[in-house]
Image: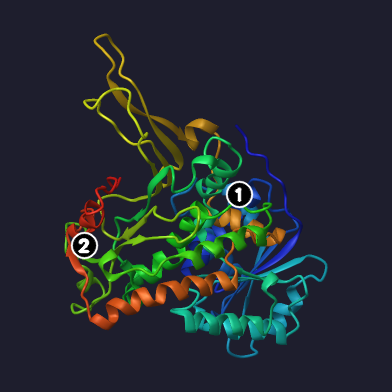
Amino acid sequence: MVARVIPVDPFDLVVLGATGDLAQRKIFPALCRRLADGQMPAEGRIIGAARSAMTPAEFKAMVAESLKVDHGAAPISAADRAAFLTAIDYVAVDARSDEGWGALAGMLRPDVTRAFYFSVAPALFGDLAQRVTEHGLATPETRIVVEKPFGHDLETARALNAILARHFTEAQIYRIDHYLGKETVQNLMAVRFANILFEPLWNARFVDHVQITVAETVGVGGRAEYYDHSGAMRDMVQNHLMQLLCLIAMEPPFNFEPDAVRDEKLKVIRALDPVAQDDIVRGQYGAGPDGPSYGDEVENPQSTTESYIALKVGISNWRWKGTPFYLRTGKRLAARASEIAVIFRDPPHSIFGEDAEWRENVLVIRLQPDEGMTLRVMIKEPGPGGMRLKDVALDMSFAEALGDDMQIPDAYERLIMDVIRGNQTLFMRGDEVEAAWAWSDPVIAGWQDGGARALPYAAGSAGPAAAADLLQRDGRLWREIG
């Protein structure tokens, strides 16, 4: 099966911070694949910009090397690399001075879509926004893309929003969360709103609980300084897991337009109950065969920062009151896995007797490593000798269902093309970001005020033992990781 590719209009995309890890590891490979698939037109141009003094030829050599690295996606051919390198250029600019901005202005075309990707630390967002506007690089149709972390708390998020709002309208600001660009997340909305099968059951009457898991096998690695300042709550729950929760829990929008979708997500965040400290488990991984303990890795043995967190979350609205959402994420866990599991209630009456073994119906949406969906249902076990029940999986792996020749685009491929199209559906709005922090801040303050340390857990495990108790006290169990 071959995906239908709709080319975008010609554009100039300026990647600020072009020599950094994100640009080299994600942005440029994503754009190269879009050019290879015919979605990025030949008239599309990418201009790398950074403080480093280098020639365009030297920059192209750097990008060429990054395109050869295996980043977990399909390899890029030599021919595709060569074609992409003809579309890129480079200019040295300084975010905090006027150096280089005049040269950049001279490279931009007046008659094409123009976008600026701020692939830099958030501390530079304001400086870049100011330079772009002061030097006349922004048009009414110009778009800017900003990466997380979008703030450290509500106060800093509001300050960032205010800084960007001085120079750009909300319609021009694209706050990127790569989880929303994953194919399975898109299919979650399709499954809910394009099939009558599920939507009537998508409420507290039929859903017992929901589990959202994002598990990683790696430690903090090169992100140690940032991570020890943020922790799993700020790094993952406040943004990635929050977005997944919103898509699961939101009401059907009146249409599939950006603000209609984001309005419904915002309503979910505002309906979240405060989280009691008894409904939170925080953990820190110990040393293991794959690396040192968290404290040693961040060079802070006394750190109280969590590398694992699990929470029980309630939503006070008509659809979900009484159905808990259990969220968990952590590093150095047993397997790399991201999934949403919707666990349905048992039938009110079983005609098969009390001795029948019963398993819940579960819809599992897998985001990684094998994107797809699984629905577990009860059937009769084959053979004579009575009615014996067995649960089986109706499994749809995208790779198998769509064919081996179907390449699922990386999240960045989809999201960058949406920026060029001017489609903000999969990007966070300013009020949505602030609402997420308004809910998260009291959760974080609760354990900080109490001085609580994160519980130790073994590297390669499922997390702290107390996390299992979080569900067991409700008569439930976590799904196995992996």
Depicted 397 relative to depicted 49: above or below: above
Position of the C terminus by quadrant: top left
Q: Position of residue 317 (x, y in %)?
A: 49, 59
* Nearest the eye: 411 or 366: 366
Q: Amino acid at mark 2?
A: Gly
Sequence-earlier tag: 2 or 1: 1
Q: Position of residue 305 (x, y in %)?
A: 27, 74
* Nearest the eye: 33 or 124: 124
Depicted 403 relative to depicted 469: above or below: above
Depicted 480 relative to depicted 176: above or below: above
Residue at which label 2 appears: 291
Residue at the image point whose x is 58% and y is 37% from the top: 195
Residue at the image point whose x is 35% and y is 73% from the top: 443
* Nearest the eye: 392 or 114: 392
Left or right of 427 in this view: 104: right
Q: Is residue 6 visible?
A: yes
Spatial CA span between label 2 and label 1: 37 Å
Residue at the image point whose x is 22% and y is 51% from the top: 472
Q: Amino acid at mark 1?
A: Asp
- Residue furthest top as drawn: 384
Q: Position of residue 70 (x, y in %)?
A: 44, 52
Label 1 Cα crowd, 10 Å radius (few <14 / some 14-19 / many 20+): some
Which disc number belongs to residue 80? 1
Residue at the image point whose x is 19% and y is 67% from the top: 455
Q: How is the image coloured?
A: rainbow
Please, what secondary structure does the residue beneath circle 2 have? loop
- Residue furthest right as drawn: 111
Quarter of the view holding residue 5: top right
Q: Is residue 93 visible?
A: no
